[in-house]
Amino acid sequence: MHKILTKLIQFSLIAIIPILLAGCGGRSGSSVTIVGSTALQPLVEKAAADYQVQHSNVNITVQGGGSGTGLSQVQQKAVSVGNSDVFAEQQDGIKASKLEDHKVAVVGMGPVVNKDVSIKNLSMKQLKDIFTGKIKNWKEVGGNNLPIVVINRAQGSGIRKSFERVVLDGKQPMNAQEQDSNGTVQKIVEATPGAISYLSFSYFNNQVKSLTLEQVKPNAANVATNKWKIWSYEHMYTQKNASKETTKFIDYMQSKAVQQKLITDLGYISIHDMKVQMDANNKITPVKGGDH
Amino acid sequence: MDQIKNELTHKSKASKQDVRGRTIAFICIAVIMLVVLSILFMITSRGLSTFIQDKVPVSDFFTKTVWNPSAVDANGHYLVGALPMIVGSFSVTILAALLATPFAIATAVFMTEISPKRGQRILQPVIELLVGIPSVVYGFIGLTVVVPLTRQLFGGTGFGILSGTFVLFVMVLPTITSMYIDSLKSVPRFYREASLALGATRWQTISRVVIRASVPGLLTAIVFGMARAFGEALAVQMVIGNAALLPHNLLSPASTLTSVLTTGIGNTVMGTLPNNALWTLALILLVMSLLFNLLTRYIGRKGGLK
């Protein structure tokens, strides 16, 4: 009995210590907690790692959880930064006026199909008809006789909102399969005959076929000029009076060091390259003063 | 005299240990109770706010078939029909249990009645291994093997209730088997001896006496397996297709309560209807696991050997 009790106590100590340590995480000066969008997570993680090499007194924690979580956590002041794929104005339950928007990158997205599909190009109208369920077979758009399998993204996810805003034009999408990550979508499209879905540019590979829309190629140069229309910002939202460490890190995210090297390496598009800008009402205007 | 008085009026070392041990045990129990109660409170209050705060009729939630919580229909009602998910969850659970039960019975009988030695040496580790495999691995195997196989054998896209059933079958099989083994072992030895003494063959003894006597144990094992299947999220999510559609056959994409919950929770904001609706799904899961628990207790009490 005594032995069991000692073991139990040891065990609970082992279980409790990490929690205590986590609680004291901020003790060595300053800490920045960043939570939210999984699409932005790899970039911020990498940038945070680089940043902490030079600033060893700052402790940056980066977590996923989704755009909704990021925004609601930063609104409740539970974290320093909330990452989001969508404008705070477009998310239910968020008071955007209380938050400060920092755009750190642009992500382009494009339709991808299984390799069995013979077509290479779609018009915007055809793409819309496919995702609303009007077109059900590839032969209706000039391809081979193969039923179309639509794979949509998770309801409420940033990528789906961006895609539907541009492509569906306010129409309801058909009820279809849903997957919540770029990686899974890529695998499923690769394996399912007749499948169509959409991915961030960085997930394009030679196992799936990316389509051109109205003969425009999905690439960074076309996104920069808005010739390719399906793209969105990656936002880092903070409270209006963010701590000095947080502001410094976001400045670093927007600096040339990150924007010119890391961002393009990881398949995002730099905000410095954009020749157009978009506001929270999805209005697109040319950037004044040309490139930085 | 004083020494005796002292010993009688003061606590001995052993009784102090006793008090200390009891205190620690009580603290642990109190902490666990607190955690459980707060989880229950959290899920219930959040889950019910769909009906109370957002005024969604309960009947709509359980009978409507369109799930799009961030939108409203032409009459301004929220589109929160959870029926497709409820049907999906129950179909995969029941089908997986139906499929797994014969295999579980056969394995358990083999391991306890027919060949206990080989059973112990070979099958026991295999079953324990199956229990230990993380569900994401099952899901990945499902996605790369089961889904294409289903597509080739039965048609469709391969994503659907059938694939979900196959994956869950492998996941609940060890649960049902190992629980049923325990209940077969608890069938008294003299039942078997009496049956053999009456001239019954081994097969007759197994099928008419041993299995018959262990029916309550088998039912409990199945219910436990179903509880596991009902709550499984990741593996099913990877193969079922996640379409919030009322499934019209086993090959059409469907969704479960858990798959909708896990894909949606990160994209919603606390306190809004899309988030509350997901908590309601969690509440349904909670209530179901409670029901499964009550069911096993009921079977255990009603059907014990007499």
Image (cartoon, coloured by chain):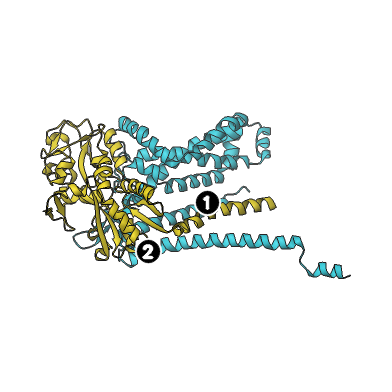
Chain colours: A yellow, B cyan
Left or right of residue B285, residue A286 in this image: left
Query: Circle 2 sits on which residue?
Result: B48
Quadrant, the N terminus of chain B: bottom right
Task: Specify the label residue B170 is tagged with.
Answer: none
Q: Secondary structure at mark 2?
A: helix
| Quarter occupied by residue A58 | bottom left
Counting from the top left corner in percent of width and height, residue A69 is at: 33, 56
Residue nearest the observer in this picture, B77 or B38: B38
Q: Earlier in the sequence, mark 2 or mark 1?
A: 2
Residue appearing at x 35%, y 54% in the figure: A35
| Quarter occupied by residue A122 | top left
Q: Is residue A83 visible in the rendered structure shown here?
A: no
Disc 2 chain ID = B
Disc 1 chain ID = B
Residue appearing at x 68%, y 37% in the figure: B194
Residue nearest the observer in this picture, A182 or B201: A182
Counting from the top left corner in percent of width and height, residue A232 is at: 21, 50
Kindly give the residue lying farthest to the front in the view shown. Answer: A54
Q: Is residue A115 visible in the rendered structure shown here?
A: yes
Counting from the top left corner in percent of width and height, residue A147 is at: 20, 35
| Quarter occupied by residue A68 | bottom left
Query: Circle 1 sits on which residue?
Result: B296
Left or right of residue B71, residue B269 in this image: right
